Each structure stands twice: as C-alpha cells, then as structure tokens.
Image: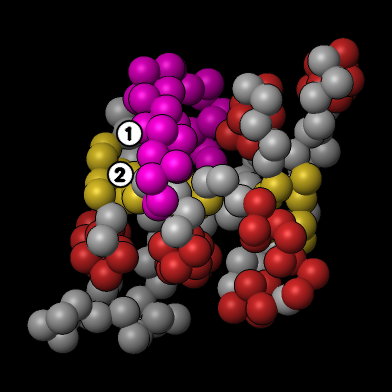
Amino acid sequence: VAGGAGYLALQLCKQGIPVTIVDPRPQRPFNRSERKWAAKRDTPLPNHIVSFFDDEFLANPLHAPLLQSVSLVIAMHADSATEPAVRWARSAGKPVIAVPCCVFPSLFPERRFADGRSVVSRSEFIEYLCQKYLLEKEKIGVFTGANVACYSTGSASGGNTVSTFLTTTTTTPAPAAATSL
C-alpha cells in the first residue's frame, strides 16, 4: 500500500516475491537496467493499481482475487491509507507491517484513545494502532525519520513473513534512495 518510488517492491520482486502496489499516484517507470534484470531472470516487475487503498477499493469485487491472494500487507509511510491497510489485514487474518508517518489529525478526528484523547502525533498514532489493532512495534534501525514498524503476524502461517522482513530490514543496509519510501 503506497508504493513510493517502488524500491521496496522491486527488492521484494528480486527475492521472487510477487508484488502488487496500490497507490493513487502513477508509479515511476522502471529503468532499463531494472527491466533487463527482470527479463533475464524471467521475474515479473511489481504490478501497480492506481487507486486509494480505502473502503471503496476493498468493496470492489474486481479486487477480491487480489485480496484473497495477499500474503503480507506493507504500508510504509502510507499516509491516509495506513489505518485502512492495518484494519483490513487484521480483519482478514493477514500479516501486516505498517510504518506510520503522517497523522492527519484534522482528516481523522475520530482517532481517539480509550480515554478520549485525540491522536495528533506520530508517536501517538503508533500507540493508537498498536492498542486498537493489537499490534507489536519495533524500531527499524536502517531508516531515519519515521522508523517504527507496527506489525502483526496475522494467522499462524504468516508469522515467518513478518519476522523475515523485519530481520532483513534491520540487518541489511538500505540504499540511500530507499529511505524515502
């Protein structure tokens, strides 16, 4: 959800993991070396659906096959799509990793803690997501800025997916361009 410049999606594809990006912004074109690499290995590049990840997207019957095939939801700096991605993944029993960035308190005044406090900062948004959706949290050391992942392993079969992702991202140095994801 929210593919950014596509670097993470491309790295997952290079590991043999099929990826579909849902993002309202057009995806950057893959450069010649990326296309050549994928063709040489008969590896598909990420698919891209130009759409918001919201209730309308989730209710569209055309997206049902995609949603059924999801093995992991990643929402890195997904802005307003962060909570819908987490909510859907948790309700579908899918593993999810979200790295919240922007909070948009004026767009989401209904985000409140049990004691009635509004969610207005990134740290509060992380706590809100962890409390409401029963998520764990872990700092991802290779990123600067918004670098706390909220995650759930989903069903028992998806646990290793999240663990592998967190281990890879915390032990493998990220290219400089990837920090903007």
Q: Is residue 18 above or below residue 38?
A: below
- Residue at image point 26% right, 61% down: 134
Give 30 or 176, whichever is nearer the viewer.
30
The residue singled out by tag 2 in the image is: 148
Residue 140: mark = 1
Q: Residue 78 in the image: state x and y as whole percent.
A: 51, 56
Type of amino acid at the residue the image marks with label 2: Val
- Residue at image point 63% right, 72% down: 58
Magenta run includes residue 161: yes
Q: Is residue 5 left or right of residue 83?
A: right
Q: Is any atom of residue 146 visible in this view?
A: no
Q: Is residue 25 left or right of residue 119?
A: right
- Is there a contact, CB below 8 Å, between mark 1 and mark 2? yes
Q: Residue 70 in the image: state x and y as whole percent.
A: 61, 51
Give 108 or 73, whichever is nearer the viewer.
73
Magenta highlight range: 154-181
In the picture, residue 13 is in which quadrant?
top right
